[in-house]
Image (spheres, helix red, strand yellow):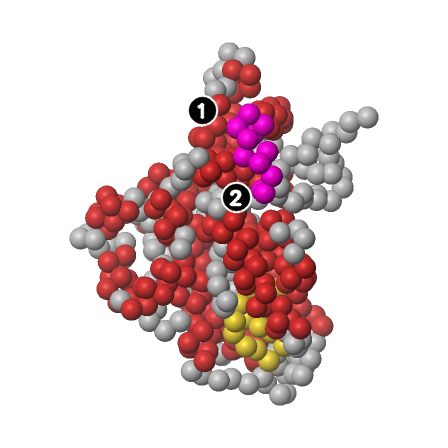
Amino acid sequence: MSREGSLAAPTRHALDWRNPDFYDAEKLDAEMRRVFDICHGCRRCFNLCESFPRLFDLVDASPDEMAGVKSEDFGKVVEACTLCDMCYMTKCPYVPPHEFNLDFPHLMLRYRAAEAKKGNTNTIARQLGEMDRNGTLARVASPVINWASEKSNGLTRPLMAAVADIDRDAVLPKFHSKTFVAADRGDPITANASAPAYGKRKAAIFATCFANYNRPQTGMAARAVLNHLGVATRVAYPGCCGMPFLEQADLARVAENAVKVSGELVKLIDEGYDIVVLTASCGLMFKSEWPLILPDNAEVKKLAAATFDIDEYVVDVAKKQGLPDGLSPLPEGITVHLPCHARAQNMGPKAAEMLKLIPDTPVDVIERCSGHGGTFGVLKETHGLAKKVGKPVFRAAAAQARGHIASDCPLAGMHIVNGAREAASKEGKELPVREAEHPIEIFARAYGLKE
């Protein structure tokens, strides 16, 4: 007997991306129609992102419901998906083990992979996704690149919009001449011997491409906090987690990076280190996406079991070993955004838990998609959608008017501050935040480890 919905915990099937059927046009079209027809009959996800309104508009405009929707229009639905996973994790009653077996985000990924096989890819998005190459090259001329990428630059931003399809309104990350890995190497640090966790925990901080090239201060803050908690640290960065390749459905490249990075990090796990990542997307890749892409790889499985997000790790240390005294109030308060890739990990609101350890500090939580989604929030064709999805977040952050805005997704944080500033301006107000921060940077400030 079939059931309406499912009370069982959702499970996810491995991606069968090496099977030729995964890319077969007829089989893919049949699966798209099956899933879309179920979504049309349910519609619980109508307000999650733009993919579902686009799908429902197609069905409603058809004289024969789903049967009358043209296959060539499916791309409009796929384009609006940021692979945030929120439909799968929070809304859909038909995910496995339900017999309907819906995994909408991975179906969108399959469609993109099939298109990529046919050569239908976004060249600019693929080049923007080459994070290690771009970061290494940008280090050499970071002052010039940062000047050229500034949103207010009326000389270069129109050129970037015309040539590189980068929206003029999008805030772009800055680059640094000294990476986080280099900064760590040049500034040795030791664990706090008087802290409760001293001698009990060791953490290898996975630098992530963003912290390494774009915001090394996040890594330095994480290192400072962990050492102050008594945790011995070392920094590791064998390469990008591959999330930018996943967005472009280049599953072979994701698998290649997974094998390389997990092979190096497992050596540290064998030495007794926990693996701590600095962005939610990398945590999701290590814990969830890699094991679904390479389900038989023992090193990938081992890494998934040993990985913590930085906020998750601080909360774990606080619960198991305890924290040293010295956290000072931040009375100006904090707005903390819980990004989709953190929520999709099913670990709870760890950033909020960590920040609430700071005494006498107001903490407002925004648990909604910012709309950014990597290159989705940067390119002209989708930046408008990113702003549309993020509007409720922008308005909430502007209304709360706290002294700090934080997110475990650095791109989401930048997007939110930009949107909240515009929202505040429309109300004749000024946003009291200069830039987005990572939650660990704020926690470091509360300990007096960061100005």
Badge 2 element:
loop
Question: Looking at the image, is mark 2 or mark 1 earlier in the sequence?
Answer: 1
Q: Which amino acid does label 2 sit on?
A: Leu
Q: Is residue 304 visible?
A: no
Q: Nearer the viewer, residue 127 or 89?
A: 127
Q: Which of 312 and 360 is in front in this view?
A: 312
Magenta-colored stretch includes residue 45: no
In the rendered view, tell whether residue 246 sits above or below residue 273.
Answer: above
Residue range of the region highlighted in magenta in the rendering: 17-29
Query: Counting other residues with Cα less than 10 Å from the Cα at mark 2, is it few (<14), some (14-19), or many (20 or more)?
Result: many
> What residue is shown at x 55% (from left), y 19% (from top)?
66
In the image: residue 267, left or right of residue 159: right
The numbered disc on residue 83 is 2
User: Closer to the camera: disc 2 or disc 1?
Assistant: 1
Residue 359 lies, in percent from the top left, at 58, 71
Main SS type for the magenta part? helix
The numbered disc on residue 311 is none
> What residue is shown at x 45% (from left), y 83% (from top)?
187
Q: Which amino acid does label 1 sit on?
A: Glu
Residue bearing the label numbered 1? 72
In the rendered view, tell whether residue 306 sits above or below residue 376.
Answer: below
Badge 1 element:
helix
Residue 432 lies, in percent from the top left, at 38, 60
Question: Separation of disc 2 and disc 1 at Cα?
Answer: 21 Å
Query: Counting other residues with Cα less than 10 Å from the Cα at mark 1, is it few (<14), some (14-19), or many (20 or more)?
Result: few
> What residue is shown at x 52% (from left), y 25% (from top)?
56
